[in-house]
Amino acid sequence: MSGFQAAVALGKRELIRQVRQPSRIVASILTPMLVWAFFVGGFSGAIGQDNTDQNLTAYMIPGVASLTVMFASIFASISLIQDRHDGVLRAALISPAPRWSIVAGKVGAGALVAMLQGLVVLASLPFVGAELSIVGVVGACFGLALISVALIGLGLGLAWIVDSSQGFHGIMNAVLMPMWLTSGAVFPINDAAGWLRMVAMVNPLSWAHSAIRSSLGMTGIEGMPVGLDWIVSVGFAGACVVLAVAVMGQATKRRATLSE
């Protein structure tokens, strides 16, 4: 079996698993939407006369979409731990398929599901007064796909190291929630305090949010060369996938050495 065929087979398995667990999809969408409602309701009276609830609502929706993608990515990554405990991963590792096909299958299927869930959230933009174009929606979908690929790759790298599902959830939340909160998902980076803007500028999620907002006709990171946000986002996604493959190779070699 070639690497591509193995990746497709593993991807189909992941998609079937997602379809058979609708509660995860509901949780991934409902929780961010509740966060969005509470933030909008809480900040609506403290954003100044030159803004409106509608503007705040529209501004936060791309960030809420990325939060949906983040939750979906955690669920997609944790399946690696479950497969390892069930013995499914061992069968894949002893097959002639290359190691990268395991990462490709899980990342591809997980990113597709996560992006579609994020798109459900973005579909609410016209209901709060935002205008959408086909080009803008395509660009936003690509941005959400890059976020999901990056976060699933990062999650798979951690899942090769952590054996406990509970421990994995804790570590992922400790890593990803600060990234999301400092990425401009709930506040404009351009108007943030100096130290917080510096933190946001080194946060790769900030650039992905900027790319998505720019596609939708919203304000991204000001003062940056055109297209730099997309370059950083693509680089971040690629680096996370490479990290997952590298960690997988080291982990399998270590286990093979210990079993000898």
Image: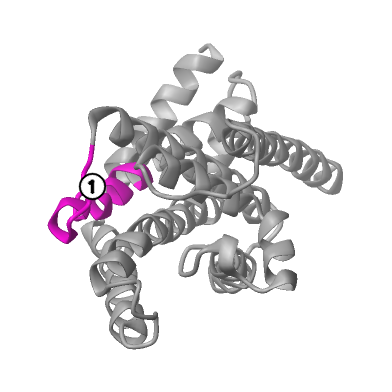
User: In the picture provided, is 137 more to the left or to the right than 218?
Assistant: left
Q: Residue at x 45, y 33 (%)?
A: 108
User: In the picture provided, is 67 more to the left or to the right than 129?
Assistant: right
Q: Nearer the viewer, residue 17 or 116?
A: 116
Per the picture, the main secondary structure of the magenta-coloured stretch is: helix
Residue 143 percent location from the top left of the image = 45, 39
Is residue 131 part of the magenta span, yes or no? yes
- Answer yes or no: is residue 76 visible: yes
Query: Above or below — where is 123 with respect to 184?
Result: above
Element class at badge 1: helix
- Answer yes or no: is residue 88 visible: no
**For the residue marked with disc 1, what is the amino acid?**
Val
User: In the picture provided, is 231 more to the left or to the right than 184?
Assistant: right
Looking at the image, the residue that sits furthest to the front is 50
Q: Nearer the viewer, residue 258 or 54?
A: 54
- In the picture of the structure, the residue carrying the numbered disc 1 is 19
Q: Residue at x 58, y 54 (%)?
A: 206
Q: Residue at x 57, y 50 (%)?
A: 221
Residue 12 percent location from the top left of the image = 34, 31
Q: Residues within 10 Å of mark 1 (few under 14, many from 20)?
A: few
Q: Residue at x 64, y 66 (%)?
A: 175
Q: What range is drawn magenta here?
A: 114-132
Q: Nearer the viewer, residue 208 or 194?
A: 194
Residue 14 percent location from the top left of the image = 37, 40
Q: Nearer the viewer, residue 101 or 51?
A: 51
Residue 11 percent location from the top left of the image = 40, 32
Q: Quadrant of residue 61?
A: bottom left
Query: Above or below — where is 171 with respect to 62?
Result: below
Is residue 61 part of the magenta span, yes or no? no
